[in-house]
Amino acid sequence: MTGPTERPARRYDEQRDPRPDRRPERSSGGPRGDRPGYGDRSARGGRGGEDRRGGGRPARPTVDLPRHVAYQAVAAVHRDDAYANLVLPALLREEGLTGRDAAFATELTYGSLRHTGTIDAILTDAAGRDVARIDPPVRDALRLGAYQLLHTRVPAHAAVSSTVDLVRTVGISATGFANAVLREVAGRDADAWVAKLAPAFEADPIGHLALAYSHPQWIVRAFAEALGGDLGETTRLLIEDNERPPVHLCARPGLADPVELADEVGGAPGAFSPYAVYLGGGAPGELRALAEGRAHVQDEGSQLVANALAVAPLDGPDGHWLDLCAGPGGKSGLLGALAAQRGARLTAVEVSEHRARLVTQATRGLPVDVLHTDGRTVGADPELPEGHFDRVLVDAPCTGLGALRRRPEARWRKQPSDLPPLTRLQRELLVAALRAARPGGLVAYVTCSPHTVETHVTVTEAARRAGVPADFVDARPLLPAGMPGLGDGPSVQLWPHRHGTDAMFLAVLRRG
């Protein structure tokens, strides 16, 4: 394997570099909340009153550490456009939180972010003012308090008092307001709030589902369209989207056996992918198998669509494989391991320099050449010649609507206006992939989105514009036998509520 080849590139998939904000002075003591597993400890019970350094000044109010960490993470997401899956682990490490404390901070962070839409509607009603008019630090604290009241078994008095303590550290003049708002929220459970605030299902089913299950209306509408208008199944998908997703590992073929890996990590073999392992708990980053390159973290759906390209029947040579949008490297890692078993070599292309480095790290020791360039330069780049590759993967940049359960803040950041530039890019990449494939070669188009504009429309338009003949291959036989809910073909849409995977879309084409 070689490192990334540096060359100028248009950065169509450039990533933010979220960094946790500077936290306030850490409180010197105090309890960690009042919830099952935490004991019966009042959230107000730490040191208070006077500053023992002298002068009679009031000490900083005590805020328990898990709630403090959750607040820091949520504030970074809303203020800095940070990503929760990056900022929260850094905060947990910084504060030394483990076990139940880390689990509680994680639940508060991810739960409040998933339910932000519904919580904001409730806070608006309880406060008698639009939530947008509440100072952001106080608003974030109230979101955490409302989540505890509506979605956890934290006693109401503990949720209210601990949140008021938190507000005192970020907006001292708002403590009375916060107390009043949270007591109003506590007057109803989540179902009663939905009954009060959501439009009637019969009159406005999309609006009802959006508020009841905390998704923007345009996303609910897109899900319903992709599911053929079945609102019952749409509801099941929205419910699944709000659940904490399991961690899936990929046992790299030739380097790890999934059954043995499952025993090693205390997990279980996956239901569908021959390489999947479901991790029972703990931090995957601490696993020896990952450090040794025998496995990596990867959703089972991503494993299935990458493996589908590798197992598709192919006549003629089979030594040159291409991953046209490789970052951060999960699918390249699986394809590289499969290529090693079959005497093939993978070229992994990534336009972002940072992500190209991640691909290099993810594929170390495998027959993979990493190119830092734009995948649309096929034919103009001597290392990306037309008509050369036997198997080509296009894991295209997309809205990511299929992984909202893993990226809870994403549902509130995405907008319908994101679609036109993304779908144009998707078409251009797929056209480039079809031109890169040799006659008789295979191209797999993959997105982590079920939106029909990013799936069926993009594939159909790209095939029409490619300038080379291409035929659809039925993708269903390329997935494990007996896998349910794969539709009528030739493309396949996976779903969290049907398959327990991210909502991955797969279309396979053969160049004529």
Image (cartoon, rainbow, N blue to C red):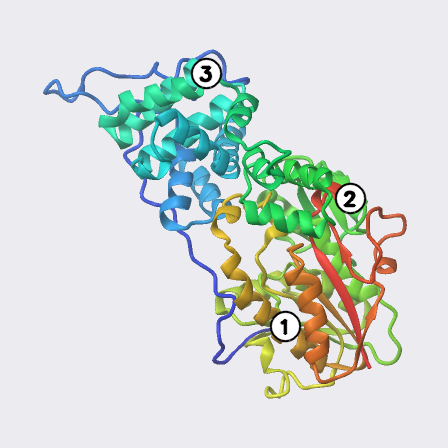
Q: Nearer the viewer, residue 421 or 211?
A: 211
Q: Secondary structure at mark 1?
A: helix
According to the picture, the residue beneath numbered tag 2 turns out to be: 270
| Residue type, label 1 | Arg
Residue 64 to residue 395: above or below: above
According to the picture, the residue beneath numbered tag 1 turns out to be: 427
In the rendered image, residue 187, in percent from the top left (x then y), is placed at 45, 16
- Distance from disc 2 to disc 1, alpha carbons, whole Å, reads 33 Å
- Distance from disc 2 to disc 3, alpha carbons, whole Å, reads 43 Å
- Residue extending furthest left? 55
343 horizontally vs 151: left or right: right
Q: Quadrant of the C terminus?
A: bottom right
Q: Residues within 10 Å of mark 1 (few under 14, many from 20)?
A: many
Q: Nearer the viewer, residue 450 or 162?
A: 450
According to the picture, the residue beneath numbered tag 3 turns out to be: 187
Q: Quadrant of the N terminus?
A: bottom right
- Could you tell which of marks 2 and 1 lies nearer the N-terminus? 2
| Residue type, label 2 | Gly
| Residue type, label 3 | Gly
